[in-house]
Image (cartoon, helix red, strand yellow):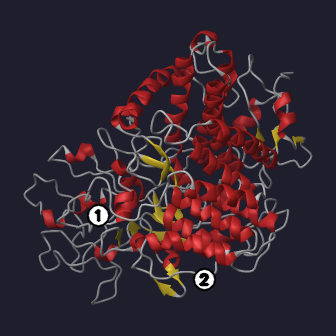
Amino acid sequence: MKTTKYLSHVSFGLIMAGMLAGCSDSFLEQDPLSFYEPATTYNSESGIKAAIAVCDRHLRYMYTSGNTNNAPIASDYFFSEIGLYGKTDANATDMQDNFAEKITPTSGLLDNGDGNHILTLWNESFNGVKYANTVLSYVDGVEGLDEKTKNMYKGMAYFHRAIKYYNLVFWFGDLPLISRIIDVPKQNYKTTKKEAILEMLVHDLEFAVENVPTQNEIEYYGMVNQEACMHLLIKCYLATGRYKQAEDMATDLINNHGLALMTEPFGTDNPGGCSTTWPITRNVIWDLHRAENKIGSFNKECILGIPNMSSQALVVYAAMRIFGPFWNNGGMVDPSGKQAGLRPARNASTYDATESWVEVLGRGIATMRMSDYAQNGLWVVNGEMDRQDLRHNSEVGNWVNMTDLRYNNPDSPEWYGKNYMLYNPENGNLLCPDTIRSWFDHPLYKIFYNDAVADASMSSNDWEGARAGSNGNLYQFRLAETYLLRAEAKLYQGHPAEAAEDVNIIRRRANAKQMYTTVNIGDIADERARELFLEEFRKVELVRISMCLAQSGIPDEWGNTYGSNWDKQSGTDATGGSYWYQRCIKHNIYNRGYTISSGNATALNYTMDKRNVFWPIPNSAITANNKAELAQNYGYDGYNPSVAMWDNWQDAVADESVTE
C-alpha cells in the first residue's frame, strides 16, 4: 500500500539529505547533490530516486523552516491584504512595518530570523532548482532505464523546478534562469524576463503531464503525480494568457481523475486540544484540515500532500505559536485588573480542564496576525456577515473569536469563566494594551496541530503545534483550488456567471449562507483567502492575478484596469500600481498616514510601496555574479533599465554553457 511505502521512500531520501548538509545556499554554487562524485552517485536508478526524494521532502521548507517563532510562508503573507507582522516586541530596526523604506537589496530585513524570511525563500527556492536540475542532468546517463522511466523522472524534476520558479517569478520578478548542473561555477548569468521563464514552465509541465503517472499509479504518497503537474500547469496557463487551455485542463482534472471535494466528515476524529474547554462539533472542514487526514486514499480532495511526520524527519511547524494571538499577554486584564489568561500545567493545583485555553489555542505569540479584513470584511458576502460558513463558524469550534475566550485567573473569582472583553464595561478603558498582537480572531481549524511534546508532559504549559513526535502533514494542492482556478479562467474569457458557479461549489461545501449569481476578480480572490489560508502563497497568487488582469484587460472589483506598466511603478499614494497593491492598501492597514502604538511598539508605520510588488533581487546574488550584470527590480537601488535580459528561455538555456 502507498500508505506504508511512502514512509520508506522519504526515509531513503534522508540519506541524501545528509549529503546536502554541505551545499551552499547560493544559487551560484553548482555542486550537485553528491560527495563530488556525481557520475558514481547518479549512475543508478536508486540514486535518481534518492534525488527525487530530496525534491519531494524539500517542498515543506517553503512553508516551515523549523523556526518556532516564524515560518517562511508568513513573509509572503506580510505582503498581502490578509496578514500583518504582529511581534510588537521587536526593536524599531527589526520591526516589519515600513516595507516601503525598509525593504532594500541590502536590508537585514530580507532575513532576520524572527522577522522576515525573504532571503530564505530565495535560497531555498534555488536549492530546490538545483536538486531538480541534478536529476535532469544525470538521468539520461543511467544505464538500463527505458525511455518511459527516464521521462517519468524528468517530468517529476520538471515539476519541482517549475514550482520553485513559479513562486520565484511572483516574489522577485525577472530572474537568472538555471536549467542544469554545470561543470564549473558560472558567474556571468544574465537575467531572464519573467514572461520567458513562465513560457519555459508551460513547456516543461506539458511534458510532465504526458509522462508522470497518475496519483493512483504513483509509487508513494507525497510523490509528484500527473494531477499535481496539471494543477501547476493550469496556473502557468493563466499567467501566460492561455485561459481556455486553463479552463479545459481544470475541467479534465475535476472530472476525470478520481478526485472529489470532501463533503462529509471523514478520517480520524481529532477533536483538538482540551475538548471540555472548547468542544469541536465534528464537521468536514475540521476533518479536512487535520494533519492525519490530509494524505491517504480516503482523502479524495488532496492532489499533492507534503508528508511531515517524525518518521520522515519532521520539520517543526509551530503554527499555533506563530499564527495565534498572544491571548495570555500579562498586560491583558479582566475588569478587576487581574491578568486575563493563565497557562497552568495539567499537574498544577490551579488547573481546570474546562478553562485550559493553552491546550486549545497554544502559546500564541502572533508573529503574523490576521488583518481586520481577514477577520471581518472578508466574510461579508452580498452585504451580509456569514458566520454560518464553517470556515468562519465558532459554534462548531472551527473559528475562535477573542470574545469566545473566558477568563481563567483563580485570583479573580468575580470574572472567572466569563468571556473576554476588550473594554471595561464600567469606565470604557481598554483591557488589552496590545491589540495588534493579543486581540484578533482566527481560524483554529487551520493552525491547530496536536503537539506531541506538550501532550506527553503533564508539566507542560506550552503547546506550539507540530513538534517532535507530531503529525505535521501539509497540503501542496487541493481540488478546491482547482475549482477557483477554473473560475478565474472563465472570468477572463468573459463568463462571470459560469465562474460564479465554480465559486459556489466551494461555498456550498462550506455551508456558506450566501451564494453568488455573478463574480468579479475580487470575489474570486476573496474566496481563495477564505478557502486557502496558509495553503496558498498569498502574495504569489495576488501578483499572478495582477499579471492576468493586465493581460486580459478586465477591470477589478473597483473598476480599475491595468496596463503593461503594472509592475513598473513606485510610490505610496492611493492611485495606480498593481492589483496586488490595491488589495494591500484597501484591505490592510498599510499607507493609512498615521503611526500606531500597541504594546511595546510606540510608532508603528505600516507602509507598502508599489515597487514592493516584487521583492528586490538580493545584493549578495548580484555581487556574486561578478562577470555579468543581473537586473535589479524597478524602484530599488541599482535598478538600471538598460541592463540586457533574455526575452526567451531557449536563449537563456543555450547561454548556460558560456562561463566567460
The numbered disc on residue 39 is none
In this rendering, would 557 be left or right of 415?
right
In this rendering, would 443 be left or right of 501?
left
Is residue 587 something one can see in this rendering?
no
Q: Please, what secondary structure does the residue beneath circle 2 have?
A: loop
In this rendering, would 11 be left or right of 528?
left
Residue at 81 percent across and 45 percent down: it is 196
The numbered disc on residue 517 is 2
Residue 394 coordinates in the image, percent (x, y):
33, 74
List the residue tagged with mark 1. Answer: 328
Name the amino acid, label 2. Thr
**Disc nearest the viewer among 1 and 2:** 2
Residue 147 coordinates in the image, percent (x, y):
67, 24
Q: Quadrant of residue 9?
A: top left
Of all residues, the one furthest to the bottom in this rendering is 426
Residue at 58 percent across and 70 percent down: it is 502
Image quarter in which the C terminus is found: top right
| Camera-nearest residue between 464 and 301 | 301
Residues packed near mark 1 inside 10 Å, few (<14), some (14 to 19) or many (20 plus): many
> How many tags in the picture?
2
Q: Please, what secondary structure does the residue beneath circle 1 have?
A: loop
Of all residues, the one furthest to the left in this rendering is 349
- Is 71 drawn above or below residue 323 in the view shown? above
Say if mark 1 contacts mark 2, CB within 8 Å: no
Residue 555 coordinates in the image, percent (x, y):
76, 75
- Is 87 drawn above or below residue 403 in the view shown? above
